[in-house]
Image: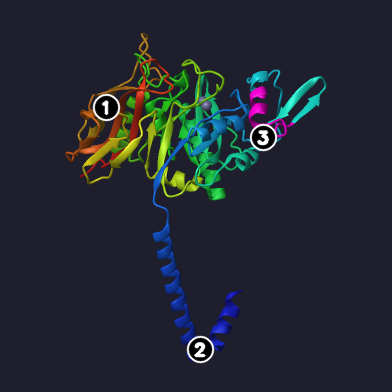
Amino acid sequence: MNNERMTIHSTTIPGEIRSALRGVTTLVCMILAFSARAESENDPPARWWKGNMHTHTLWSDGDDYPEMVARWYRERGYHFLVLSDHNVLQNVDRWTNPATNRGGIRALKRYEETFGTDWVVSRQVGDQTEVRLRTLGEIQAALQQPGSFILIPGEEITSRYLTAPVHMNASNVQSLIRPATGDSVLEVMQKNVDLVWEQRRQTGEPILIHLNHPNFGWGVTAEELMQVRGENFFEVYNGHPAVHNTGDNIHAGTERMWDIILTWRLAVLGMEPMYGVATDDSHSYFTDSPDASISGRGWVTVRSAELKPAALIEAMERGDFYASSGVEIDSMRWEKGETLFVRPKAVDGETFLFRFIGTRRGFDRTNEKIRASSGDALRITHRYSDDVGEILKESRGTEAHYTPSGDEIYVRCYIESSMPQEFPLHEDDRQRAWLQPVVYGPAE
Ligand SMILES: [Zn+2]
Ligand SMILES: [Zn+2]
């Protein structure tokens, strides 16, 4: 209908009918408003959903079929899983040769035993047998259970600058992102983040991008990551054995990087906070060796009313989630303006170390570059004062409180259980959780 016709109609409707129509319109609006309220009262309450956002399969360099991988997570009680293969989406026609692929004949055997030979699609090419990799849509149809387990499309956008790996995961990606390159690590990250945001604008679908394993190949420094616009998530914990979560004698660990990034973003750069995720980055599904990248080491737990990609991403963008390598939260009060409180779920005799970490206003901003013996600055996270990411309070027990003193820029909480991690990366690794920062801001 165009404007001209609308005008004609309104002038030809007698006044009393027009006012009656206005009454009907008002009534309809009231009904709509009431049903909207009624609907919100009937909305399911927010609850916690457990998911892994970084997983590999035979679609790239994992050693098992994607259905097998998804089934493992579903059976272990995960609610969502992002299959994030390198630079590929599972939506094309792809065949694999079990005689030469990473899974080998044993993967094919286990796959056939589990899903049945009717499900496994194979063909002969010369004297070789090939198996078709099932697409995400097919896997979703076979394995998803609405309200209890979903598969979210993903891609590990795998790029580099010179020898520095720059890997970023796009969760709920709608079409393949071809990895961008650039003239610095920062530029490579920014260009890939921009591509994701461009797709997000075009599709209207929320897509979450997070930086993977910053210390893999010592790829990304805190100073580089803090500057990326539109990138507010990174892996504070990644279960792959080659990623140096804890750094080394000259490289900062990921927790130290997190505090540096939070402090500089919030107090110096005027940017959004950075949130920490934990992931498996699993590739190996036929071993339980600590030296392999196996499943079950790191995940996120997200608070949302619905188990849907958009709802989960929106919750994560509000910081309404925590990262875990075993610790599960039973109850928490985690809001600005309140005494912070957290109580993990515990088994008999289990206790926890609670470490509240933050930076106060007026912190010492001095930091120094790490230099080679020649005096040249190295591309390594700078060394900062102890004011950055100060331990504000440490306690042991089964629950913990923190009352802000009023000068904190942010406060986050690290929790370590007395119980060993189920699939430890290092022998003495305990179950841990990382709560997201509560941001108070740089000014009063
Ligand atoms: Zn990677
Ligand atoms: Zn990966």
| Left/right of residue 148 with respect to residue 226 in the rendered view | right
**Label located before the other in sequence (2 or 1):** 2
37 is higher (above) or lower (below) than 434? below
> Which disc is residue 232 wearing?
none
Q: Position of residue 48 (x, y in %)?
A: 40, 42
Residue visible at 43% across and 65% down in the picture: 36
Q: Position of residue 259 (x, y in %)?
A: 31, 30
Q: CA distance from mark 2 to mark 1?
A: 73 Å
| Left/right of residue 309 with respect to residue 404 in the rendered view | right
Residue at which label 2 appears: 17
Residue at which label 3 appears: 134
Task: Give the magenta-colored segment's residue range.
Answer: 108-121
Residue 257 seen: no
Q: Position of residue 39 (x, y in %)?
A: 43, 62
Residue 382 seen: yes
**Quadrant hosting residue 159:** top right
**Quadrant hosting residue 264:** top left
Marks 2,3: beta carbons within 8 A: no
88 is higher (above) or lower (below) than 375? below
Depth order, front residue of 329/169: 329
Question: Can you tell me whether the CB of the residue at mark 2 lies under 8 Å from the nearest atom of ligand 2?
Answer: no
Depth order, front residue of 441/416: 416
Helix, strand or loop status at disc 3: loop
| Residue at the extreme right of the image, as rendered | 126
Q: Position of residue 146 (x, y in %)?
A: 53, 46
Question: In the rendered structure, which amino acid carries the disc numbered 3?
Answer: Arg
Helix, strand or loop status at disc 2: helix
Residue visible at 53% across and 18% down in the picture: 287
**Label located before the other in sequence (1 or 3):** 3
Question: In the rendered structure, which amino acid carries the disc numbered 1?
Answer: Thr
Residue at which label 1 appears: 351
